[in-house]
Image (cartoon, grey):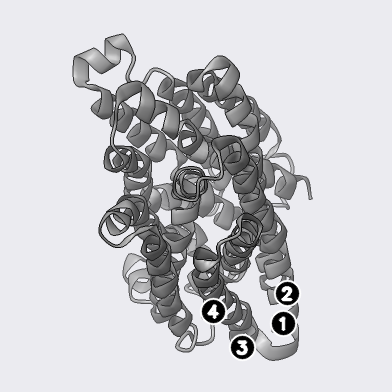
Amino acid sequence: MGIVVLMVFLSVMTYIDRIIISIAGPGIIKDFSLSETQMGTIYSAYLFSYTIMMIPGGYLADRFGPRLTLTFMALGSALFTGLTALGGSPGLGTYIGIVPSFLMIRMCMGICAAPMYPSSGKMNANWNPPQARARVWGWIACGAGIGGAITPALFSWMKARSGWRSAFLLAALGSAILGAIWCWYAQDYASERPRSIGPPPARTRTLWKELLTNRDLMLLTAGYFTVDYFEYIFFFWLYYYFGQIRHMGMDQSAIYTTLMWVAWMVMTPIGGWVSDRLIVHFGLRNGRRIVPIVGLTLSAVLVYVGSNVTGTLPTVILLCLSLGFAAATDGPYWAAAIDASGKHAGTGGAIFNTGGNLGGMIAPVLTPLIAKYFGWSWGLYAGGIIMLAGVLVWFFVGKQTAID
């Protein structure tokens, strides 16, 4: 239980470090006279390196164990979250340019953060049987919702009183403390006594060809691409959409964005729990796919309706529910990918999450471009349409056969 709680807290801090820049974004745009597209590029810099380094990060989790890999992740993220406060500063900004300075720092942070979820997937596989993995992952994903819920309210308040740079410094301190606690407490396997201080004793050769040609893993990866594309529109642009496009005011937008993360926080463990219950009654294949098929379909419908209603409260409720139903599929997706990857859950999870983050990397840049030519409603519609394609993959995912 303690190891799950710590992974939840790591997930909280990882998402704070990841999305705090979206709260600082309006201030950065104002301070340095940046365009929306330039800010979108800065948002995507983290995701670019995070995505590129995802598979190496998963391999490190398989090779050296998730304990050491997650220690590196937490401490490295702390360092570069703190350094983000120097982005555009007179020294760094003058020497390499304002936008390049932010790009460089955020890319380095993405490299450090990349092992987080593949390593957590490896830890989940090491500690839990298949019938418990979706709900455990639901709680890990819930940590992202907690981080997302805390970030808009807390760091908007800090930004208004101390400036956006102080928010990054506080987040960095939290990550460093948590990384030290994880290194001291965690162990790679429940059966380890005493806790290992090095790589796990048994190592297996990573079967790259088998992973990359595994039909189920590739289908799940394609489906997760569509889900992450949709979710990252919300992560990076919903605060801006509420405040600047729907004219709700930036303080109110922070509250409404927090509600979005509350929906995520509530729906991820529910989705994981329901999925694990369904596989008991309907088997692994049919039980796993019910939550994604229903959840993603409802999410796409709700984003369309929420973009077209005129009242503030209906808009906020419908869009929060839209994200919530998408988030409910996170546990089933990850549990299915872990099951398909067998002993190589770190690398297999990394391949799977890389596909997802390719969608997440594209969304922050493509969404304002779509909005520029077709309007912001179409920026949201596009996410729903793409996500519906992700529903289709679940009709072709077969029984999850582990790669040994």
- Disc 1 to disc 4, how far (Cα)? 18 Å
Q: Which mark is residue 286?
A: 3
Q: 315 or 108: which is nearer to us?
A: 315
To which residue does mark 2 refer? 274
* Number of other residues with Cα within 10 Å of mark 4, as a class: few under 14, some 14 to 19, many 20 or more: many
To which residue does mark 4 refer? 297
- Disc 3 to disc 4, how far (Cα)? 17 Å
Q: Residue 220 location, x and y as percent?
A: 45, 73
For marks 4 and 2, give the one nearer the viewer: 4
Q: Which mark is residue 278?
A: 1
Give the mark nearer the N terminus: 1 vs 4: 1
Per the image, label 4 sits on a secondary structure element best described as helix
Q: Amino acid at mark 2?
A: Val
Relative to 310, 137 lies left or right: right
Q: Residue 330 location, x and y as percent?
A: 58, 64
For marks 3 and 2, give the one nearer the viewer: 2
- Verify CB contact (< 8 Å) between mark 3 and mark 4: no
- Disc 4 to disc 2, how far (Cα)? 17 Å
For marks 3 and 4, give the one nearer the viewer: 4
- Disc 2 to disc 1, how far (Cα)? 6 Å
Q: Residue at x 51, y 43 (%)?
A: 243
Q: 232 or 219: which is nearer to us?
A: 232
